Amino acid sequence: MEFNFQQDPEQTTEIPLPFNVDGTKCKVFFDLETTGLGRNNDIIQIAAKTNSNSFNRYVIPRVDIQIEASKITGITYSHGTNKMYVRGEIVEPVSLHKALLDFIHFLKEQNQPIILGHNICNFDIPIIVSKLKECNLFSTFCETVKGFLDTMKVARKCIPKNDAENLKQQTLVKQFVGENYSANNGIEDVDSLKTLYDRTFTSLVKSDDVFSVLYHNCMESYSNLLKNKIVSRPVCMQLAKDGISLKHLKLASVRDVNGLKFVLQDQKIPRKSVKSIQEYFQNEE
DNA sequence: ACTCCAAATTGCTATGCAAC
DNA sequence: GTTGCATAGCAATTTGGAGT
């Protein structure tokens, strides 16, 4: 029904309300382990943690785990024997579909949570979104989750240049929590990230740091504008962050200039950009 | 190994001012 | 009014670093 637009924001006929994260209290820290660094690699582990609960699923990959990834995650899998090991210990992996369903179920137990992770904006989120779409679970996921927050973006914004050696999760944990942890087991990763967040990030985070799960869909909708340099990347990001796609702007523009007012009022895009976007729509016809 | 973002650097244009 | 230079501002490009 109506919620189909979540699968493809270009299908919507409604201009979304300004993105609003009020009332979101629960946080789910999460981390993916994958077969490699590419965006098309398979998921081999989903780990997550809230204040009171933990989640962990190992996932059967369809492609081989790259050596570099195995070294880091300690996970190996043989298609021949169908067996998965984590540092020598045998584990029971499930199918991608089941792992995603279970994860959504875990998320549903929270009240419209935001999901948090380190560098997830450009790694974990694009990967899990593409897998969710593949399994036709993306719209359900969108209904379940309020948005996501990338702790690396917060760290870059809030931590002065010389206060941290670098922005790796492991370094930040060592520096601000004082713990050395064996990075790269999914569970330990979410554990240490939660500790880091609770100790030092809580007070730094603003609701402005939360992104819509439709962020990448929206950015994709702006690809033409970006390619033709009609509008700047930061402006697109600002809009996409709140789940506003090109289609939404077009609908607004078609109705009248006031349709874009809510965007302007919130100062999400400068007037100069609004003008160039409107000209773009006119030239399209 | 792959991909992406953002900071840093380089390159270019335009503007302002001084001298003629 | 014209020329030349210097600097500010913007655009394009390169580099570095983060995730498995």
Image: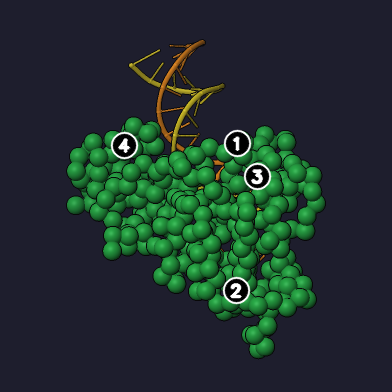
Chain colours: A green, B orange, C yellow
Q: Earlier in the sequence, mark 1 or mark 4?
A: 1
Residue drawn where x is 60% and y is 74% of the image: A59
Tell which subunit mark 1 falls on: A
Residue at the spot of label 3: A197
The residue shown at (43%, 67%) is: A137
Please name which of the two marks, 4 or 2, marks the residue nearer to the observer.
2
Q: Secondary structure at mark 1?
A: loop
For residue A31, say whether it is visible: no
Local secondary structure at mark 3: helix
Vertical placement of residue A20 versus A214, above or below: above
Say yes or no: labels 1 and 2 on the same chain: yes
Separation (CA) of disc 4 from disc 3: 33 Å
Alpha-carbon distance for marks 3 and 1? 9 Å
Report the disc number at residue A204: 1
Q: Amino acid at mark 2?
A: Val
State which tag comes first along the sequence, 1 or 2: 2
Q: Residues within 10 Å of mark 3 (few under 14, many from 20)?
A: many
Q: Is residue A275 above or below residue A130?
A: above
Q: Earlier in the sequence, mark 3 or mark 1?
A: 3
Residue A273 on image: x %, y %? 34, 38
Same chain for labels 2 and 3? Say yes or no: yes
Q: Residues within 10 Å of mark 1 (few under 14, many from 20)?
A: few
Find residue A21 and report its horizontal and vertical position in percent: 45, 43
- Residue A236 position within the rendered picture, expressed as x and y whole percent measured from the top left: 41, 45
Q: Which residue is mark 2?
A: A59
Q: Quadrant of residue A198?
A: top right
Label whose residue precedes the other's in the sequence (4 or 3) = 3
